Image: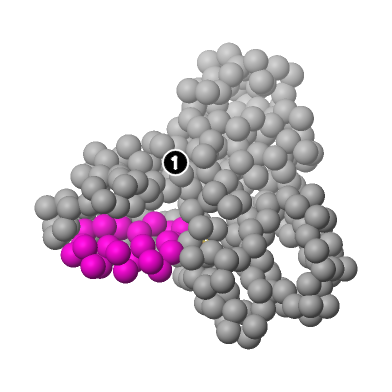
Amino acid sequence: MEIKVAKSAGFCWGVKRAVNIAVNSIGKTAKTYCLGELIHNRREIERLQRLGMEFIEDMEKLEPGNTVVIRSHGVDPKVLDFLKRKGLSVVDTTCPFVKDVHDKVIKLEKEGYPVLILGNPNHPEVIGIAGHVKKNPMIVSSLKELEELPNFPKLGVVCQTTLNMNFFKEAISILSLKVKELKVYNTICKATSVRQKEARELAKSVDVMLIVGGRNSSNTTKLYQISKSVNERSYHIESKEEVSKSWFVGARSVGITAGASTPQWVIKEVIDYIKDLCKGGEISGRGICKTSGRELQTS
Ligand code: SF4
């Protein structure tokens, strides 16, 4: 069994940065809160809890005089104002690429463009972007919704950084027929597009494909959908415990990728588990188990 690991699997630059800043902020005040889940990965959240971080959704419950971490998805500026007024020390880990989307919607609005955001209206990143637009922005997550929009004289468009590139292309081609003056910023993060392209190519070249990451992680779910569209034997797992031996019947190769919020140690556990199954003869390929692609270390 050959195990091929995608080079881009796991934490992106922005998530790695956010986790490092968050960990360094623990212990500076009596309590260190994080507003919402720092990243969409249950096991990493549990690790951070063990280090002393408290995850909290309700801002009213934050006690003044403590530290609160803003996650890489960013927030509505009104949230930052509220936290500062409440006397909390704010550690903002918003990814600079997400901040760039905030700047772009502010610019579009100043230039007189109504703003349309392509993305999931319930995703924290999209809620944060929308919070930077004064007049209610449109948020669209499906091609059907776009088809139903009326014509516009002017429109400015940005997108969620983890949007599927094919969806973005189709959305812009629909809008180009409806809008006279269309200004588009492709704000899909490079880390996302590289990951999606690599997942598609890897999925095509292996018998079985595993996508590791939280079920509540939007970018992991998109990787799974992309993989599944080219390889029926694609499986979305959160951890090694979910791997089933039956998936590997007759398989000679397995590809592994992971969302931007999946820590290396979780990916490594999955790789080691498959290697053990191989070595123990529990799945095919006994004695010829080898790993290619990205080298991973446990953290
Ligand atoms: S996917 Fe891109 S935008 Fe999102 S946190 Fe990672 S580097 Fe930042």
Magenta segment: does it hold 88? yes
Ligand 1 has an atom within 8 Å of the beta carbon of the residue at disc 1: no
Whether residue 248 is situated above or below residue 88 in the rendered picture: above
Q: Quadrant of the N terminus?
A: top right
| Quadrant position of residue 188 | bottom right
Vertical relation: 233 (above or below) 102: above
Q: Of 287 and 295, which appears nearest the observer?
A: 295
Q: Which residue is at the front of the view, 171 or 299?
A: 171
Taking the spot 48% from the left edge, 65% from the top edge, the residue there is 131
Give the residue type at disc 1: Asn
Residue 220 against residue 91 in the figure, above or below? above
Q: Give percent across and percent down for residue 285.
A: 65, 22
User: How many numbered discs, if any?
Assistant: 1
Q: Secondary structure at mark 1?
A: loop
Tag 1 residue: 41
Which x, y percent locates residue 123? 53, 51
Compared with 214, 9 (above or below) is: below
| Residue at 74% over, 47% down | 201
Could you tell me residue 145's position as x and y percent?
75, 52
The answer to whether residue 96 is left or right of residue 154 is left
Residue at far right of view: 177
Residue visible at 68% across and 56% down? Answer: 140
The x, y position of residue 120, in whole percent, is 61, 51
Q: Is 223 or 144 nearer to us in this picture?
A: 144
Q: Which residues are magenta?
A: 67-89
